[in-house]
Image (tube, grey):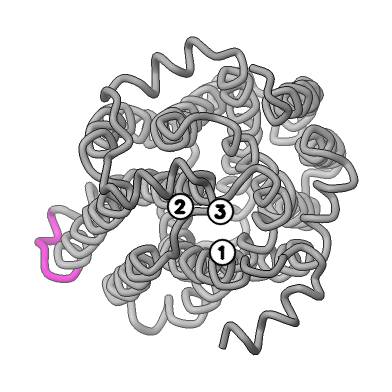
Amino acid sequence: MDRLLAPLLRRLGTIEAGEERPTLLAATYFFFALASYFILRAVRDAAGVAAGTDKLPWLFTGTLLTTLVMNPVYATVVAKLPVRRFIPVVYRVFIALLLGFAGVIKYGPSAWEPYLGPSFWILTSIYSLFVPSVFWGFMADSFRPEQGKRLFGFISVGGTLGALAGSFLTSQLATVVGTPVLMVLSVLLLEAAVQAAKRFPPSFRPESRARDEAQQPVGGTSLAGITHVLGSPYLLGVCLYMLLFTIGSTVLYFQQAEIVGARYADRESRTAFLASIDTVVQLLTVLAQLFLTARVIKWLGVGVTLAILPLLSMVGFTALGVAGTLTAFVAFQVLRRAGEYAVSRPAREVLYTVVSAEDKYKAKNLIDTFVYRGGDQIGAWSYAGLQGLGMSVATISLCAAPLSAVWLAVGLWLGRRYRSREGGGS
């Protein structure tokens, strides 16, 4: 199979000889991981819509606190187990939790129903960050910086196709088989991701390959993620970029709850509609990842690539402020999320190819989970506060537009610091 696909892959202009098998296996791993999550995503979002915007800030708070507890536990596992052993452990913890939820939803007493939706929302929100964060940390530890700029876009195609498959399955099965069956299907796909990770070839980075061959853990302490971030202007810049992205995403998520909730009355219809949006996003994304992502990063550089999504958000929030309709929301949501998956996320992951192994797993995970959810908190409570002041969806959108300008400036600054580190600077 590798021999048959190798010529085709090289025609894309981003994959060189000897990189075909690792790239395909990485894309396969990401396919199963995101297919697993996207089966759950629409179910989670429907639960968020059902809870209403007045409950969402508390759900974000619960997620942030749970993430804060889980982070040092995860860092301890990273410090004590070799990379190719701790990845299956982390994923199988989520498998056990999902199976437990499926059993309770199917066979638990009806008195538990009011607690299941919020609990599942929090679990899935944490799952959505931990699973891809572990994957991208592994990729940054396996590929060199120059390879990351060329290959991360194509590897992302695997995740996009997985997201497309998961969204499509959910849109077709949500009203037929029910939530517990969807959760079991998600578990099977996550276990397939584990098997792909276990078969990944040796790292292209000599230091990572030597560590894997010796079965050495990354080492360090459970608090290294926090201390390293606080001591590094570069990592603090990545934190700020992530924070501003998340605040905007949370504002848009609340608007989704209001706009979609007003149009669709029952949970199944909301789930199907939201899954349909996911499907359109992934179709648009996969085309961009195949033919544009690597070329955009090469032509424009990491910094300008990071600035594309903030620029799009400035325009999108302004447009949503002028015309706060379902059509305007869907157009902005589709373009913003496609831009995140196609250009912003691959460029953001390239930033981690020039940090230490410990930072690839610990600092990165802290940023991808706790900082991400911190942005959720700021966005959630700010949205609730602005609503309390009587502001409409349109007015809040206009308030979010200037924030995107700051986000754009941070992206350009990170691009300059990345070039310095890639060239041997600090």
* Element type where label 1 sits in the image: helix
Using the rendered image of the protein, determine whether residue 186 is visible from the camera's viewpoint. yes
Residue most extreme to the top? 231
Q: Quadrant of the C terminus?
A: top right
The magenta segment: 106-111
Using the rendered image of the protein, determine whether residue 310 is visible from the camera's viewpoint. no
Q: Nearer the viewer, mark 1 or mark 3?
A: 1
> Residue 228: where, in percent of width, then height?
44, 17
Mark found first going from the N terminus, 1 or 2: 2
Count of labels in the image: 3
Dot 2 amino acid type: Phe
In terms of depth relative to the viewer, which is nearer, 261 or 354?
A: 354
Dot 3 amino acid type: Gly
Label 2 neighbourhood size at 10 Å, few (<14), some (14-19), many (20+)?
A: some
The reply, left or right, for residue 402 in relation to residue 275 is right
Dot 1 amino acid type: Gly
Q: Which residue is mark 1?
A: 159
> Residue 127: where, in percent of width, then height?
37, 50
Q: CA distance from mark 3 to mark 2?
A: 33 Å
In terms of depth relative to the viewer, which is nearer, 325 or 422?
A: 422
Mark found first going from the N terminus, 1 or 3: 1
Query: Quarter-wise, where is residue 369 in the image?
Result: top left
Q: Which residue is mark 3?
A: 261
- CB of mark 3 within 8 Å of CB of mark 2? no
Mark linked to residue 369? none
Q: Which residue is mark 2?
A: 135
Relative height, residue 320 to residue 209 (above, below): above
Relative height, residue 153 to residue 134 (above, below): below
Relative height, residue 54 to residue 221 (above, below): below
